[in-house]
Amino acid sequence: MRIGDALRRIDDGMLMRGAFFVLLAASATFLVIDVREMLATNSELPGFDPMHDDQPVLPPALTDGRPAAPPVEPASPSEILRKAMTFDLKPGGVLMAEGTIDPGAAGRFAQEIEARGEYVKTVQLNSPGGSVDDAIAMSKLIREKKLQTRIASRGLCASSCPIAFSGGAERIAEKDAVIGVHQVFNGSRERPTAEQAMSSAQSTTARVARHLDEMGIGSGLWLHALETPPDRLYYLSEKEMADFKLVTQPVQAPAAKS
């Protein structure tokens, strides 16, 4: 009876958080096993990198009762999305952040905010992802400045881009915005040792999970990422965007062109 009473007094949120971290640890363990097997068989680590590889900007969907093709074709050409991220201040205080989140993108973003900060109200993302560290740094600065984040209709926010998006004090996705997640991975051409690969996979997984939790994003989003190979994307439905609290408002109709 005493044990039962104690369990009933535990907060539901604490139980959910505990279950999430158990699943997180298990996922990291399986990822480590996969890395060991790849290194042992002399195969290369996943190397999809939208800046360099001749791969689709939108990988196929994870096929588990979901369509194999991306839900919507992005409005921007692949050539634009593959380039290093650029920043362009649009009317209405919208800072357009477009292209791959290359190493160094967070530094350029910080310079842009410092130079134009008083004019920037919204960061509109259109990116196939890239550097996890830069995405986290951008996300933290966005939250510090209490900026809104937005993904336009047929805009793309994939791989590490949703990490940057999560920093918005308000997070808005328009109808037909394409948002997808998958496992983090080493996109460089250098092959790490098994120990380096294990250490990197586990620390990155924990760092991203902690950051999303701090931003108020539901744990289910990152679990879908952990379950999805790096050459696939798990495309989020409008319901999932709301359920995981990735968006703070219902999916909106596209903004009228001025």
Image (spheres, rainbow, N blue to C red):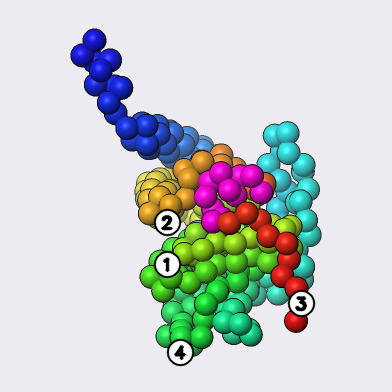
Is residue 62 placed above or below 11 in the rendered structure? below
Q: Nearer the viewer, residue 122 or 64?
A: 122
Viewer can see residue 47: no
Residue 215: image tag:
2
The secondary element bearing badge 3 is classed as: loop
Viewer can see residue 250: yes
Badge 4 or badge 3: first in the primary sequence = 4
Marks 1 and 2 sit apart, C-alpha to C-alpha, by: 8 Å
Q: x, y (%) of residue 113?
A: 46, 82
Badge 1 or badge 3: first in the primary sequence = 1
The residue lying at 60 percent from left, 71 percent from top is 124
* Region in magenta: 238-248
Q: Nearer the viewer, residue 253 or 59?
A: 253
Badge 1 or badge 2: first in the primary sequence = 1
Quarter in which the C terminus is drawn? bottom right
Q: What amino acid does circle 2 point to?
A: Met
Marks 4 and 3 sit apart, C-alpha to C-alpha, by: 27 Å
Q: What amino acid does circle 1 point to?
A: Arg
The secondary element bearing badge 2 is classed as: loop
Badge 2 or badge 4: first in the primary sequence = 4
Q: What amino acid does circle 3 point to?
A: Lys
Residue 240: image tag:
none
